Image (cartoon, rainbow, N blue to C red):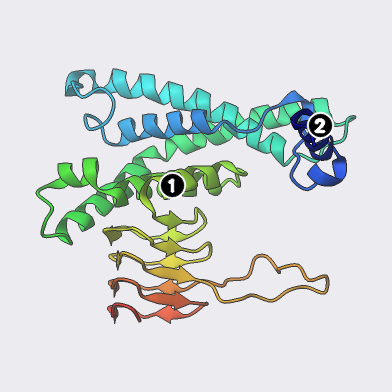
């Protein structure tokens, strides 16, 4: 078969609705998908706001802090509002008749959610500062908080997670998962944005850690590389589809250490002050 004929047949095959129906997204009302590049830019700016001087403009001084934070916060608000609207449009089920009212409602809702998220940035910074402290205290090799903030993958992953988790509270679709998967790709640390993680949390080394959707982790918990807080196989409905919404991941109470490559599956509770050995 000639090269041209092969290519033409492939194009026809790929253009057949039977081939693409399960993997095709038709943009609704000409609104594109959330932009991964825009969300990465937003997270990078948030990292500058949360850890001023470490990322972005390194010459920032206390007397220009408010201006610097204000300018960056405005950028975050604009980026986030746009991306939330795109996420809402992605899951929108409005009819053609309802679309005008629906789009106006989603625009207003996006602005409200973005402003509410910004109001929680102080809390996000506080939680991350406790994570930095826990990481420093838990690693004899760490020379100071600055090294932990600037170099350690756990802080990068937790920054993305804590941002994503706050966006999940008002049920922002799609975007929180994109943000945590960015950190997963960069660090090898996979934290679902729905997981609940208390303050003073750290992961030593980090690579290969998995924290599932319905995990609850208390205060002052330390994990090592390769730890999995996962789920067992879960039941299917009468049509063979997985039943969603089941609490299927572990609860880890306060002051727990879980050493490298330990695997904990299902809705079990690891009691306060426990130590789980490596490879368990």
Q: For the residue carrying disc 1, how many other residues have a C-alpha within 10 Å: few (<14), some (14-19), or many (20+)? A: few
Give the numbered dot on residue 5. Answer: 2
As measured in the structure, the alpha-carbon distance from the residue carrying label 2 to the one carrying label 1 is 39 Å
* Residue 59: image location, x then y, percent: 18, 21
Give the numbered dot on residue 267. Answer: none
Task: Name the side, left or right, on which 190 lies relative to 81.
Answer: left
Task: Name the side, left or right, on which 52 lies relative to 73.
Answer: left
* Residue 17: image location, x then y, percent: 86, 41
Task: Tell which of 113 and 243 is nearer to you.
Answer: 243
Give the residue number, with chain letter if any, for mark 1: 185
* Residue 27: image location, x then y, percent: 75, 31
Task: Name the side, left or right, on which 75 lies relative to 90.
Answer: left
> Residue 61 falls in which quadrant of the image?
top left
Task: Tell which of 230 and 176 is nearer to you.
Answer: 230
The mark that comes first in sequence, 2 or 1, is: 2
Task: Tell which of 181 and 108 is nearer to you.
Answer: 181
Local SS, label 2: helix
Disc 2 versus disc 1: nearer the observer:
2
> Residue 41 falls in which quadrant of the image?
top left
Q: Is residue 188 above or below residue 29?
A: below
Q: Is residue 71 above or below residue 255?
A: above
* Residue 158: image location, x then y, percent: 36, 50
């Amino acid at each position: 078969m000639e090269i041209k004929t092969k290519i033409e047949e492939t194009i026809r095959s790929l253009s057949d609705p039977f081939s693409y129906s399960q993997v095709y997204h038709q943009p609704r009302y000409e609104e594109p998908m959330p932009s991964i590049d825009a969300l990465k830019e937003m997270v990078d700016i948030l990292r500058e706001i949360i850890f001023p001087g470490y990322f972005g403009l390194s010459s920032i001084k206390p007397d220009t802090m408010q201006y610097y934070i204000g300018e960056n916060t405005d950028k975050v608000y604009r980026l986030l509002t746009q991306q939330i609207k795109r996420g809402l449009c992605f899951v929108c089920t409005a009819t053609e008749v309802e679309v005008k009212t629906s789009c106006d409602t989603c625009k207003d809702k996006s602005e409200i959610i973005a402003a509410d998220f910004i109001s929680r940035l102080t809390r996000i910074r506080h939680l991350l500062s406790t994570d930095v402290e826990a990481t420093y205290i838990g690693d004899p090799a760490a020379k100071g908080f600055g090294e932990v903030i600037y170099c350690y993958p756990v802080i990068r992953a937790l920054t993305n997670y804590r941002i994503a988790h706050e966006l999940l509270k008002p049920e922002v679709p799609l975007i929180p998962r994109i943000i945590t998967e960015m950190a997963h790709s960069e660090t090898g640390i996979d934290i679902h944005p729905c997981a609940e993680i208390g303050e003073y949390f750290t992961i030593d080394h980090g690579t290969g850690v998995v924290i599932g959707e319905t995990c609850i982790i208390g205060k002052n918990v330390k994990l090592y590389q390769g730890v999995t807080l996962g789920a067992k196989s879960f039941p299917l409905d009468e049509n063979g589809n997985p039943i969603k919404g089941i609490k299927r991941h572990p609860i880890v109470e306060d002051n727990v250490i879980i050493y490298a490559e330990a695997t904990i599956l299902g809705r079990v509770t690891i009691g306060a002050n426990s130590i789980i050995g490596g490879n368990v």
